[in-house]
Structures are given as C-alpha cells and as structure tokens.
Image (cartoon, grey):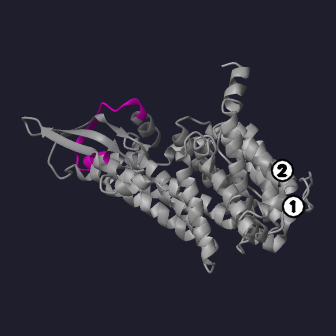
Amino acid sequence: MTLIQSVRQNWFSNIRGDLLAGIVVALALIPEAIAFSIIAGVDPKVGLYASFCMAVVIAFTGGRPGMISAATGAMALLMVTLVRDHGLEYLLAATILCGLLQIVAGYIKLGSLMRFVSRSVVTGFVNALAILIFMAQLPELTNVTWHVYAMTAAGLFIIYLFPYVPKIGKLIPSPLVCIVVLTVLAVYLGLDIRNVGNMGELPDTLPVFLLPQIPLNLETLMIILPYSIALAVVGLLESMMTATIVDDLTDSPSDKNRECKGQGISNVVVGFFGGMASCAMIGQSIINIKSGGRTRLSSLAAGVFLLVMVVFLGDYLTLIPMAALVAVMIMVSIGTFSWDSLRNLKKHPLSTNIVMITTVVVVVATHNLAYGVFVGVLLAAMFFANKMGHYLHIGSDIDEAGSMRTYQVVGQVFFSSSDKFISAFDFKEALDKVVIDLSRAHFWDITAVAALDKVVIKFRREGTEVEILGMNEASATIVDRFGVHDKPDAVEKLMGH
C-alpha cells in the first residue's frame, strides 16, 4: 500500500461519519473530563486540556484507528493522593514520566502480552465497565425532580428510535440528535435542572506549553515514580483492552505495540500542556463506533471540536442538560454490556464463568480495572494449568521374564502434573531394568525436570537400572541443563553419600 493510499484509508475514507461522530464524542467528553478532574482534585481545565491534547495527538501516533483516548476515571483515582499531598505540578511531572514508561513498554513489545488475556477476562472487563458507567450516572438520577427522569427517558427514546426515521435516521448520529433536542427543549421550557454549567467552570483560553515547576532531583523522582508506574500500567491495560474490543466491533486488527508508544507520546505532550494522565476510553470509543466513526479523523475531530466548543462556545455548552448526557451514557452501558455472556452461562464451562464473574466483581468492588484484570488472568492461568495437568497418561508393560518394565509417558509434564508423574511409578517392584519412553511426552519446567530426577534416582536407589528413551529436543535441552540424574557428583550429593 502506498503512502497516499494509506493516508486516504486511515484519514479520509469516512469523512462525514467521522466528523459527526467526533461532535458526539466531544459533547460526551466534556462532563466526563470535568467529573474526573473533580475526582482527582484538580481544576476542570486540567481534565479538559488533557482530553483535547490526548485525542489530537493519539490520532497521529496511536495504533487503533477509531479509538478515543482522553481523561478517564480509572486514571483519576490513582492521582488523588499525589495531588492532595504534593500538588498539581507533581501530577504534571508524573504524567510526563508515565508517558516515557509507556513509550519504553511499546519498544519492548509489552502490547503483545494481550494474547495472554483470555476471552472470559475481556468479557468480564467489558461487563464491569458497563456496570461502572451506569453506576456513574446514578448521582444525576437521585434526589432530582420528575423533569430529569422525563428528559432522560425522552433522550433514550430519541437515541433508540431516531435511527428508524426514513432517510435522515442513518445520516445523523442519534446521540447528537438527543443532545440537541433536549438542550433546545430545556431552554425553551426554562426547566430548572442540572446542566453542564453546574459541573464546573469551563476554560476560556487555549492550553499553553509549560514545564512543571518542581525540583529536578532524586527525591522528586522517588515521589512521582510509584504513581507514574501505576498510571502507565493501568493506562496501557485499559487501552489494550479497549483496542481489543474496538477490533471486535470493527472486525479489523490493530497494532498494540504502536498503541503503547502512541499512548506514551500523547501523555508526554499532555503533561507539558497542563493536562492529567489519560488513556483509551471504552465508553467514548463505543459512542464513536456506534455514531459512525472509523478512522483516525474521528479522534482528531473529537479533540478539535472539544477545544472549540469549550473555549469558544462555552456559553452554549453550559446549557446542555445533564439528563441528555446521562441518556447517552446509559445507551453506552447497555451497548457495552455483553448480554450474550449471560445467555452463555449455561453453555460455557464452569471455569470460564468463574473467571468472567470474578473479573466483574473485583472491578466493580475496587473501581480499579487493573485489579480485576490481574485476578482474572491469574484465575484463568490456574484453571488452564489444572486442566493441562490432567492431560497426562502413564501406561506400562512388563517383559515375559518379568525383569524389565517399560513405562510409556503421554502428555505434558510441568508443575501441575509433576506429582501425578511421580506417583505413576512403582519403586518397590523387583526389577532389573526400567525403560521410560518419553517419545510422546514434553517436559516444560524445572519442576518437571526435578520429578524426572526423583523417579530415576529412586529406581537406582532400589538397585534398578533406568533407561530413558525418545526425549524430544526441547525437553532434552531443559533436562540436560537442570537435571542431575545423569551427573554422578550431583546424584551422590543429592543422595547424601
């Protein structure tokens, strides 16, 4: 593919859809960025500048076209103590260091680790995020007048029914129609309900380049490094998971390692322009895809529209009722949740269901996506190891003279199956020779090698000759390196002579 073809495909193959989706995403980003700034304990402009810079820079540097990155709640929660104890300048420095760590992660190809995250963990992550998105809307729906419920219901009515309107239903994203109609309605009727203006003061100037005003010494590094590592890990984890989901939604691949570098470069820029550390947003990414956004232009448009709206059209933006944005986010949570996972609970294995449900419970309970994914991956690995441990069969037959027994080992020998491997041999049987046929077995780790050593040495201790046959090259390599049964000095030391 030539450079011109690549640019056309990645930027200009879906102009109308991307621009319209960018407007919807920009509108949805505003209350989120303000809310996450409040969570982190910083001025709303910090979240808004971060969202603008992140969306614009990632459009050029990221590896997943159509994915939206901006200020997120998961990242904001990690900043609270840093801002409280040391102030905004240290947060900006931590954001820059977070970006540098993410760039390093991209170059050492940590994005490739996503292949170790099972489908059940991704499903649990998605379902938990859908629940968190819905729960985040509840404060806007408690202790309010009936007008708010009526507006929210009307918003959902527009979102789900407008696409069926002939001719224009498919041309204009229904969330955009919802926001415009409810804003006009609220202003016309003079409804006294919460709007974007009640969330916090919007900035009226463009972001400017600045250096964090902190002492450049080891003490400062020790303060910000733990936060930067946590931000880098959570940011990459959420971005990689979101990229996987957008891959599925668009049925197209993405470059995870480039996305790691792109997130890093973007966060470095964000830090220098007065923003807080950011990452991919699953909710806004789904809004973008469902509104017709597909290419890098949609992310760029979202960032540019966000800045233009906030700085130049702030007076109009403040009029948008929160009920309209709540309706959009409820649509996102409904669309995000994997309803098939509930229908498949009876079909899928119990272990798969446990991993998925545990991931959901941990994420929702802690509000930390990293904890949930870590626990899910750990559980999935344990279930896999347990299952693989059962795929080991050891049969045997004895010669006519009754002096030589041949053991045939079939399957995988590793830490989970090593005890089963040892228990399959009868060390008290009176034999002159034992043959262990490993032509259909594989030894994976030092636990397996230690098990083979134990079997051979036990037989020799009983005065039985042992012969090992058919070991494949990979198994022979690890056995030769770590095994002791064929090293006389080591055996004698092990047996205590």
Q: Amino acid at mark 1?
A: Pro
Q: Nearer the viewer, residue 473 or 22?
A: 22
Q: How far apart in space, not on screen, are marks 1 and 2 (Cα)?
A: 11 Å
140 to 429, vertically: above or below: below
Residue 321 lies in magenta, yes or no?
Answer: no
Can I make out residue 424 in this image? yes
Residue at 31 percent of width and 48 percent of height: 457
Residue 407 point in image, percent of width and height:
21, 40
Q: Nearer the viewer, residue 200 or 52?
A: 200
- Range of the magenta residues? 456-474
Residue 93 point in image, percent of width and height:
83, 58
Residue 191 relative to residue 251: left or right:
right
Q: Amino acid at mark 2?
A: Val
Residue at 56 percent of width and 60 percent of height: 156
Dot 1 or dot 2, earlier in sequence: 1
471 to 89, vertically: above or below: above
Residue identifier under label 1: 203
Residue 441 relative to residue 105: left or right:
left
Give the crowd class for mark 1: few <14, some 14-19, many >=20 residues within 10 Å: some
Give the crowd class for mark 2: few <14, some 14-19, many >=20 residues within 10 Å: some
Residue at 54 percent of width and 59 percent of height: 157
Residue 145 point in image, percent of width and height:
63, 78
Residue identifier under label 2: 308
Q: Residue furthest top?
A: 2
